[in-house]
Image (cartoon, rainbow, N blue to C red):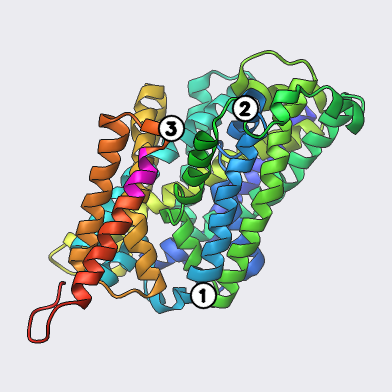
Amino acid sequence: MIDLVIMGIYIVTVLAVGLYSSKGLKSVKDFSISNRKYGVFVIMATLSASFIGGGFSTGNASNVYSVGIGYIAALFGFSLAQILIGTFIAPKIGRFHDVYSVGGIMGEAYGKKAQIITGLLSVLVCAGILGAQVAAIGYVVQVFLGFPYYTGILFGCLVVVFYSTFGGMRAVILTDVLQFIILSIGMPVLVVFGVLQNGGLQSFIVNIPAQNLNILNSMTPAAFSSLFLTFLIGETLVPPYVQRLLIGKNPAVTAKATVISGLYSIPYFIISGLVGLIALASGYRGEAGLVMPTLVKSVLPVGITGLVISGMLSIYMSSADSFLNSSSIGLVADTILPLSKKEISEPKKLFLARLVNLLTGILALVFAMIGSNALEILTYAYNFWCPMILVPLAAALLGVKAGPKAFFLSFCAGFSGTILWKIILGNPFNLDGMIIGFVVSLIAFIVAKFLQMKVPAGHVALK
């Protein structure tokens, strides 16, 4: 009963934040990036809460349980990416002070067509991840509260859609900060109780199978390198993370927050991975995907359980609200508005953004209820963001001057390379097609830029 009360307080608080955040919301820019006055802690917290989804938490625990600590080491590729972004890209974000979306950045750098393409791909990528997170919320509610899976999906989706539709980015940021605090407390508490149940640290270490402490274990060096590179570039500069770069007081604040977020991810990945090792040491031999919820139910006392379950809900809700907001902005700001032939007033733009946010949430709910096959198709699109968009986007953020042709050559080369390597050839040498697509995209962009620089005087430059 106490655990239910704690969870109830958490949900009510999240909903209240959404309603409170709706005050003063006047434009689609407010809906997308709020007031751009946030400091280091808030940006760090909302960025961290956005990327800590199911894959980096329950998925990490499951893979460490199945494969070993090599999965934690591979995840450090993502940590490195965040630190590099904070060091080299975030300090230059001030050039896009009037932009409030990823597509807007691409539009300024490569033209309207690039903006629309980026917007459509943003919708596809974000909707897929959103559906997966909503499905995971339903699963958590089913496991811990005993409600039917579909009831859990409906409950979780309605909560996220409610506060994000009313409050926009302001609500997402404030709830992300709350969720960041809860999961930052809940995960270490879970690990501490799990180690104590195993008789303390020394006993816990002794009971871990030796192969799970081997970084490579069943992986070849090539497979591990591919996994590390996948985490290094796979989620780099996806829409929700780019939006976090646009909300700071100034570029210096944003850069510092991004680096700290990358550093924060390192101990978080270790802690969430330890859950898998604790399950091994405890003698758990069930389904890998149930490692974290099983540990929560078996080792935590009343009261603490409610806090950690709220933390698990936070894991999924913090990612879901970020991808939902980015999906609606991608459709409205980067697709509908650029295609519109007449001027739309700010109140109508805001209404449109909220309506699309609501409809996108409902669509994610439908896909989550259809089943895993639908979600797998959507999340598969995630593999194409990096090879098609990352290179020209990173170049634009770094201030590299290149025309629309450089974008389209890079985009088409990345898409073709990924399809050829991943689907036609079947990822030879254990190297993921996304990595090959990224490399081909980079080469095409460099060639296009080189040709642009080499145009003789009197000729039309490559644009």
- Which secondary structure, mark 1? helix
Residue shown at the point (74%, 33%) measured from the top left: 306
User: Going 37% across and 56% down the picture, which residue do you hit?
Assistant: 390
The region drawn magenta spans 433-438
Does 268 sit above or below residue 462? above
Where residue 389 sits: x, y (%)? 32, 55
Q: Horizontally, is 359 left or right of 298 in the view?
A: left
For this rendering, which residue is in front, 293 or 344? Answer: 293
Disc on res. 430 = 3
**Within the image, what quadrant is residue 84 found in?**
bottom right
| Residue denoted by label 1 | 91
The amino acid on which the numbered mark 1 sits, given as a three-letter code, is Pro
The answer to which of marks 1 and 2 sits earlier in the sequence is 2
Q: Earlier in the sequence, mark 3 or mark 1?
A: 1
Residues 32 and 429: in front is: 429
**Pointer 2: what residue?**
62
Quadrant location of the C terminus in the rendered image: bottom left
Q: Residue at x 36, y 35 (%)?
A: 380
Q: Position of residue 430 (x, y in %)?
A: 43, 32
Q: Is label 3 or label 1 in front?
A: 3
Category of crowding for the residue at label 1, using alpha-carbon neighbours closer than 10 angstroms: few (below 14), some (14–19), many (at least 20): many
Give SS at disc 3.
helix
Asked which secondary structure carries label 2, the reply is helix
* Residue 436 is a magenta residue: yes
Rendered location of residue 455, percent (x, y): 14, 78
